[in-house]
Image (cartoon, grey):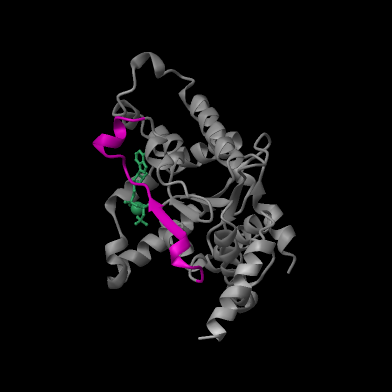
Amino acid sequence: MKIDKMLKRYRVEHGKHFRLKDYDPADTHGLGSELKEAAKEQLGEGVKEMARLQDILAAQDRWGLLLVFQAMDAAGKDGTIKHVMSGVNPQGVEVTSFKAPSAEELRHGYLWRCMKCVPGRGRIGIFNRSYYEEVLVVRVHPELLESQKLPKVLVTKHIWEERFEDINHFERYLTRNGIAVVKFFLHVSKKEQKRRFLERLDTPEKNWKFSAFDLKERQCWDQYQEAYQDMIEHTASEYAPWYVVPADNKWFTRLVVAEAVVEALKGMNLKYPKVSGEAQAALKEARQQLENE
Ligand code: ATP
Ligand code: MG
């Protein structure tokens, strides 16, 4: 399989002509379900490669990697994160889930709580939802904006454009500091979400996952799609690309995400630190000392 081609198809680096409706949530890049097993094998290989690169990322201690996940409910964020990160060293990864902001968080600018969770050098950070909620749920439910206690004169019709601008600058800043940013929108269809909700209702072990609140958000489906469209259009960039990942088939979603993470790590041209001449001599001496015990 041509992985480069596959990734390119879903990667958005320039938002100007981006149209969400051009992306099919059921797309599998021509891989029929008979290739599902092969795809799973490929995912396993991807996870292995990720683990290998993560080890060098940590050793080199220069770059960091921030992965951002956004999606409608039941699109598979949690499962994708679990599968994709299954092979990596847990000591080098941190997952942060962003829920509705607390009273203290609302006293600060919206990037405050996220800034604190950005991964450091040598580490991978995963945002399960993120500052992008500020142009998604907050946009779909304007009453949330009211609760943000912003000075009235600052809340104008330009607020979303201003947020896009600030987010772009924030990501530019991170990447200029060696923290790479890759963003995933898991693109599920309304039909598949219904199927997954019904499955949650029909399977006792999945009942706990169902929330009446999710059903309420489903009623705002079209507003959300518009908000995602606008978000990607305004925040896709070469330095912090979006991947619009088809999410109706979980096996395919996971494959695309794993390969995109591998590609991002490969792009850093990671190398184990070279031990200098002096340190080499110290290693030799240590060996001698051990052998002489
Ligand atoms: P899951 O349901 O799979 O466990 P989830 O990410 O949907 O995961 P929930 O606790 O159900 O987790 O939802 C978190 C909620 O918090 C979402 O509805 C999201 O829109 C909301 N949220 C996140 N960030 C903000 C924000 N900045 N302002 C308002 N609401 C937010
Ligand atoms: Mg939820």
Residue 140: image quadrant is top left
Residue 134: image quadrant is top left
Q: Is residue 30 left or right of residue 84?
A: right
Q: Is residue 109 above or below residue 125?
A: above
Q: Is residue 157 left or right of residue 40?
A: left
Q: Is residue 101 above or below residue 5?
A: above
Q: Is residue 178 left or right of residue 188?
A: right
Q: Is residue 6 magenta?
A: no
Which residue sits at x=46%, y=19%? Answer: 157
Q: Residue furthest left?
A: 103
- The reply to whether residue 12 is in sight is yes
- The reply to whether residue 185 is in sight is no
Q: Position of residue 61 (x, y in %)?
A: 56, 55
Toward the viewer: 239 or 74?
239
Which residue sits at x=75%, y=65%? Answer: 2
Toward the viewer: 87 or 272?
272
Toward the viewer: 27 or 270?
270
Q: How many marks?
A: 0
In the picture, which quadrant includes the N terminus?
bottom right
Which residue sits at x=38%, y=13%? Answer: 153
Q: Position of residue 252 (x, y in %)?
A: 58, 65
Q: Position of residue 53 (x, y in %)?
A: 61, 64
Q: Is residue 288 above or below residue 255?
A: below
Q: Which residues are magenta?
A: 87-108
Q: Position of residue 107 (x, y in %)?
A: 29, 30
